[in-house]
Image (cartoon, coloured by chain):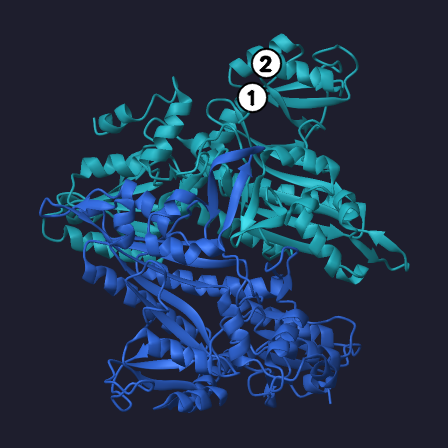
Chain colours: A cyan, B blue
């Protein structure tokens, strides 16, 4: 069998998922470890996925009126300390510049772990009147959080992300923006990444340090663990008060603004890998795949094969499809393995017999179905296959996820469910002790609050009346 | 006159160019000062220019086979020290992280001032065989150089840039790449930024710390000073040897690779401002202008005006033109000033009388010519005007620049020429003393070596036989 070589090299996805993940990201050259502990190098194949994510998200942000800007990476230590909860949350994991230009600095500089404090300080300078509102700004940037345990894409000392920061005249408008961006993320996750997500409010314990409320989106990975794939925070007037960010309202009164912030990061690449991969390696949704179609010549020494390959490549490229032809001097079987491992959505094989029959062979990475297709109308056929692969991947993920959402009425049931790789819906009284107890006994944490009916109406831990229903899961 | 208000607010471009620059960048909201000394905030209007620069350049890089990646920002101090000239050049201006995650680090980390050392360390891990060559990678990133004197866009502690890093099997291939990218920059500067540039090799004194040879492109600003707008370095085997970056060549011998690096930065925004601006403010070339066309209603309370404005806006937007309509409740005169100051290439005015006559008024920012144009075929007319503005701005800049290139045969003539806001072509024996003497006595530095015939054949300083002809200028 063609794939033996690679199947052997990649750890068993069922038996050792963490090693499978590491094997896949390293062998496909998505990423490498940087020289400094906990850092990563995003290699061209991985970065091309990030560029596709950026393009898709950026267009969505701009369609809501958001504009991009860039704020300095160095934050004076005193800024971080302005918001009490915020500094408590971030101080333990910041990197600190103490020397620059050959001298010790008078005030140490924090390398941004997130930019609320510095951005609000600038907004407080720019904001004068209600006419200046809303302020809707996003930045694409690197941030640094010094973590003890790191894994490429999932948790690294430095990572790339976008962070949106908005200011509004009223609580309602800021809350609306918070939810709007959560929904932008959800639509993007489903329609671009082909990953269905649960969205909802986070508990007090899990919320962003300094927020009034955090809303998150959670994605189920193949091992049943949840990955927080994006968050949107309603910040109330917390940062406005810390930065004295005020505006003169229509009624002539000076008021603090209401703000929101929201972000997703290179973590999404980790989500893609762990939501869709299989034993052969990556399976990439067409909308973010760096290469959507790979063309492989078979019996390339035969007259006309390479010419036909070049002709098809040009035709597909001109139609806006990200296509490459692999004309290296290696066996087709070797190439099949390589491009399957790299998760290219559609493979086309062209040999002398195919050309005689005015056809080529097409393999879909998501289904591994192989069939002959006519060279007439090839562009349209390929476009339809890519659309279908995109749709099929979302449906498959959604089906798996939905089958793995269960309800529980006790800590034991929660434990059993998460051991079975499930998300668990259970009722909760709302107290921190019960939330902590579940974490302690099941290693599952509350992911987001669920809408709708209660499971039983009683807290799964203490049995008291439930105020909330929670999705619990073990999480990355 | 409409513009009095702004003319008064912006310092006189002839009398106080530095203050004019500061006034323009602040009043047009391109940029603001960050809280940490020497840092800048790139505001949405400024960042949109950077996005246009990125899109144009990125496509050009990719067309030559370059792919993007991302390398960590933190470089172990020991890495920087591997290349002797490099560390000497950069050590005085680096920012140093000494603490992270609540602890003092065992080895301090340098915030990248440029990434040759860390990128070559990764390449040396990836590079095995001649089959892996060439390596053609670029990254868009922030870098930090702690400078004593800073000015937004021109010289800031942190700035945004791209840095390409390539490796090749031979000296010739690496040199070819170095020149190829220099020419990409030149074509981009002229056809996108509408700025004519002089390109050539830098002297030893002016070359990049660690390079074998540096090639630069120099642009003339309106005050006659030169701005180094981009550089491309041939690094030979310097960094390859420092990082032990070797490959097994076709002949079975293990060899060091030859590398190049090349970069441009947010400095280009400074170049745009100082190459094209006037007393009214910015004049932006259409290809990088965030807004290419601004539509302003006149007598907007009149029935049908706002509807017509919206109709034209939609038509232009659908044609791919970056257009906005300014329907704020302010006088047209106020808006004319504002958008002229912001450098929007084309302004359209629409009033009741215009609508009656099936026309609108069009003002070109680059020429300040105003004329009536028909609403029939408006999209085509606007496209032609934008193309013409782009072309006209380059011609105008080139004419000014060419008129201000003079030759000199003595230090006195060089001094007189740079005082007259000129670039000076003069012969040079090649010794450091003569180069230093010109700098000392005229505050002009050697910008790039000139091709072609000598001016007299004798060094303008010492009179000995000339080995080179040099372009001298005062520089940013």
In what element is the residue under mark 2?
A: helix
User: Is A187 placed left or right of B405 in the picture?
Assistant: right
In this rendering, the answer to whether B28 lies above or below A19 is: below
Q: Horizontal and vertical percent for residue A328?
A: 18, 46
Foreground residue, B470 or B351? B470
- Residue matched to label 1: A474
Neighbourhood count class around disc 2 (C-alpha, 10 Å): few under 14, some 14–19, many 20 upward? many
Foreground residue, B191 or B328? B191
Question: Could you tell which of marks 2 and 1 lies nearer the N-terminus?
Answer: 2
**Residue B246 location, quadrant:** top left
Q: Horizontal and vertical percent for residue A143?
A: 55, 44
Foreground residue, B302 or B22? B22
User: Is B58 placed left or right of B8 in the picture?
Assistant: left
Q: Is any atom of residue B82 visible in this view?
A: yes
Q: Horizontal and vertical percent for residue B237?
A: 24, 54
User: Is A305 placed left or right of B367 in the picture?
Assistant: left
- Residue matched to label 2: A442
């Amino acid at each position: 069998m063609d794939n033996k070589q690679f199947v052997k090299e990649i750890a068993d996805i069922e038996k050792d998922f963490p090693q499978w993940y590491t094997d896949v990201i390293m062998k496909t050259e998505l990423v490498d470890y940087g020289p400094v502990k906990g850092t990563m190098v995003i290699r061209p194949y991985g970065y091309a996925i990030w560029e596709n994510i950026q393009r898709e998200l950026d267009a969505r942000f701009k369609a809501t009126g958001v504009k991009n800007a860039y704020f300095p990476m160095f934050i004076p230590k005193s800024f971080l300390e302005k918001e009490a909860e915020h500094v408590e949350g971030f101080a333990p994991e910041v990197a600190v510049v103490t020397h620059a230009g050959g001298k010790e600095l008078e005030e140490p500089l924090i390398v941004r772990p997130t930019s609320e404090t510095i951005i609000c300080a600038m907004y407080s300078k720019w904001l004068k009147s209600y006419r200046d509102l809303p302020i809707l700004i996003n930045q694409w940037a690197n941030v640094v959080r010094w973590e003890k345990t790191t894994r490429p894409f999932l948790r690294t000392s430095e990572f790339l992300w976008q962070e949106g920061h908005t200011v509004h005249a009223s609580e309602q408008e800021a809350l609306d923006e918070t939810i709007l961006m959560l929904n932008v993320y959800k639509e993007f996750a489903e329609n671009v990444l082909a990953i269905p997500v649960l969205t909802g409010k986070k508990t007090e314990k899990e919320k962003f340090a300094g927020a009034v409320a955090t809303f998150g989106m959670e994605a189920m990975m193949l091992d049943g663990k949840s990955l927080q794939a994006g968050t949107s925070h309603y910040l109330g007037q917390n940062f406005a008060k810390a930065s004295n960010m005020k505006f003169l309202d229509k009624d002539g009164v000076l008021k603090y603004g209401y703000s929101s912030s929201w972000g997703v990061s290179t973590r999404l690449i980790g989500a893609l890998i762990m939501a869709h991969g299989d034993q052969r390696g990556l399976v990439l949704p067409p909308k973010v795949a760096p290469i959507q179609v790979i063309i492989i010549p078979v019996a390339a020494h035969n007259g006309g094969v390479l010419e036909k390959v070049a002709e098809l490549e040009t035709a597909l490229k001109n139609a806006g499809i990200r296509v490459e032809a692999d004309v290296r001097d290696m066996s087709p079987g070797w190439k099949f393995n390589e491009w399957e491992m790299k998760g290219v959505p559609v493979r086309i094989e062209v040999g002398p017999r195919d050309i005689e029959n005015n056809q080529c062979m097409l393999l879909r990475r998501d289904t591994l179905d192989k069939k002959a297709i006519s060279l007439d109308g090839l562009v349209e056929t390929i476009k339809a296959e890519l659309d279908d692969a995109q749709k099929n991947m979302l449906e498959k993920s959604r089906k798996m996820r939905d089958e793995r959402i269960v309800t529980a009425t006790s800590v034991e049931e929660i434990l059993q469910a998460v051991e079975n790789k499930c998300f668990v819906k259970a009722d909760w009284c709302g107290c921190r002790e019960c939330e902590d107890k579940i974490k302690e006994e099941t290693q599952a944490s509350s992911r987001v609050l669920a809408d709708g009916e209660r499971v039983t109406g009683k807290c799964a831990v203490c049995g008291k009346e439930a105020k909330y229903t929670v999705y619990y899961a073990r999480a990355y």
